Amino acid sequence: MGTAIYVVAKKKVKGLDAFVNGKAVGRIDDALLEKLCTDAGVESLMSFVSQDPDELSEFLEDEGMESEGEEGFPAEEWFTPEQGLVAVRGLSAYLGANPDIIPDCAAVVEDLNEYEAVLSILAEKKIHWHFAVDF
């Protein structure tokens, strides 16, 4: 199946399909993604990842791992859509100018364009968001 990075809106937006494939971005090694964002001059996409502590605790328990409950996990963080748009657009422009820098660059740019579309609508509606990781 593979890892996917997707957008979570703080509240539902009527008529918005927030689905983003996110698998091409999810396949990039965290260190490489960090370097790409640094080279593009934007905040790392991974800095926008957050998780509901209850959901994280449940996930760990489902995977057979010990969980100390939500107290041991950081609080869920939310970001303005504008913050994400700066990062997504900057990385997309950088990769567009350097298409041979990573394998499957076109698919990564496609994911970034999907993130941009969702974040643009969230910006219009002034709804906060974060990325989540699906394993």
Image (spheres, rainbow, N blue to C red):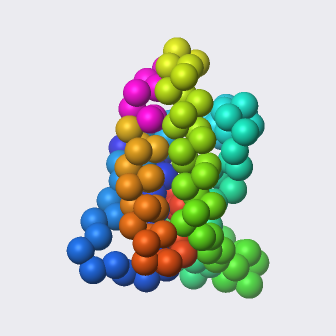
Q: Is residue 135 visible?
A: no
Residue 111 sits inside the magenta stretch: no
Magenta stretch secondary structure, dominant: helix
Q: Which residue does the image show at 45% across and 35% down from the upper left?
A: 108
- Relative to the observer, which residue lies in front, 17 or 61? 17
Magenta residues span 102-109
Q: Quadrant of residue 124?
A: bottom left
- Relative to the observer, which residue lies in front, 35 or 117? 117
Q: Which residue does the image show at 62% across and 70% down from the upper left?
A: 79
| 101, above or below 17, in the image | above
| 89, above or below 32, in the image | below
| 88, above or below 32, in the image | below
Q: Where is residue 1 in the image (x, y as percent from the top left)?
A: 36, 43
In the picture provided, is 54 more to the left or to the right than 67?
A: left
Q: Can residue 36 be seen in this view?
A: yes
Q: Which residue does the image show at 39% across and 32% down from the upper left?
A: 107
Q: Going by the picture, which residue comes out furthest to the front?
A: 124
Q: Where is residue 121 in the image (x, y as percent from the top left)?
A: 39, 67
Q: Position of residue 23 (x, y in %)?
A: 42, 43
Q: Which residue does the image show at 58% across and 63% down from the upper left?
A: 82
In the picture provided, is 133 more to the left or to the right than 17?
A: right
Q: Where is residue 50 in the image (x, y as percent from the top left)?
A: 62, 67
| 77, above or below 19, in the image | below
Q: How many numbered discs?
A: 0
